[in-house]
Image (spheres, rainbow, N blue to C red):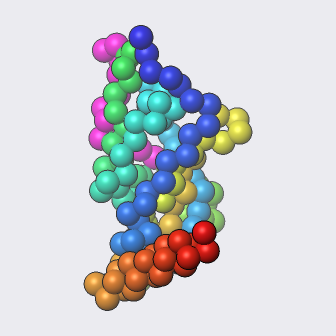
């Protein structure tokens, strides 16, 4: 029996906000095959080491693991293949110009399905955090947790 396919999908990359400062966010479409979208609707996605890069003037996401579809046949997809991101020319030009700055990268933040059922990916132009910045983030989370406990 196949697993439940959900209409609405919302998968977040929680580690990205801990590792990076987000400077600018974009919403991009994904070029997928049929079995990939079915696996996404099952929630079988891993953002662990995913990042975006430019190849031949196009933006691709690399290391986004979408598990093979359980009901798929020999037409099933490769789980780690590079997937093309669909953005406007203006957004692509802006991102490529910003990437020339030292220390900036493009990271996936959130994968979701739109009202029409298409898979969308929120990506962010990001700058890596230093160790002391990560400590500050942990401290802020702890303070917020303690104040929430005190309010209840």
Q: Which residues are magenta?
A: 73-84
The quadrant of the rendering that contains the N terminus is top left
Furthest-bottom residue in view? Answer: 132
Furthest-right residue in view? Answer: 115
Identify the residue shown where x is 44% and y is 21%: 3
The location of residue 15, given as percent across then percent down, is 38, 63
Depicted 117 relative to depicted 135: above or below: above
Q: Nearer the viewer, residue 15 or 146?
A: 146
The location of residue 74, given as percent across then percent down, is 31, 15
Q: Nearer the viewer, residue 129 or 63?
A: 129
Residue 96 in sight: no
Identify the residue shown where x is 32% and y is 54%: 48
Query: Chief secondary structure of the magenta span?
Result: loop
The quadrant of the rendering that contains the C terminus is bottom right
Depicted 138 relative to depicted 8: above or below: below
Identify the residue shown where x is 42% and y is 52%: 60
Magenta span includes 80: yes
Q: Quadrant of residue 26?
A: bottom right
């Amino acid at each position: 029996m196949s697993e439940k396919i959900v209409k609405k999908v919302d998968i977040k990359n929680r580690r990205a906000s801990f590792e990076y400062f987000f400077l600018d966010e974009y919403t991009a479409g994904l070029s997928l095959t049929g079995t990939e979208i079915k696996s996404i609707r099952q929630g079988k996605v891993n953002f662990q080491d995913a990042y975006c890069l430019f190849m031949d003037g196009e933006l691709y996401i690399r290391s986004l693991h979408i598990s093979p579809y359980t009901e798929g046949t020999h037409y099933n997809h490769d789980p780690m293949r590079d997937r093309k991101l669909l953005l406007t020319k203006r957004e692509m030009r802006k991102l490529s110009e910003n990437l020339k700055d030292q220390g900036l990268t493009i990271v996936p933040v959130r994968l979701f399905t739109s009202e029409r059922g298409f898979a969308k990916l929120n990506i962010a132009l990001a700058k890596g955090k230093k160790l002391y910045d990560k400590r500050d983030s942990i401290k802020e989370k702890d303070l917020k947790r303690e104040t929430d406990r005190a309010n209840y």
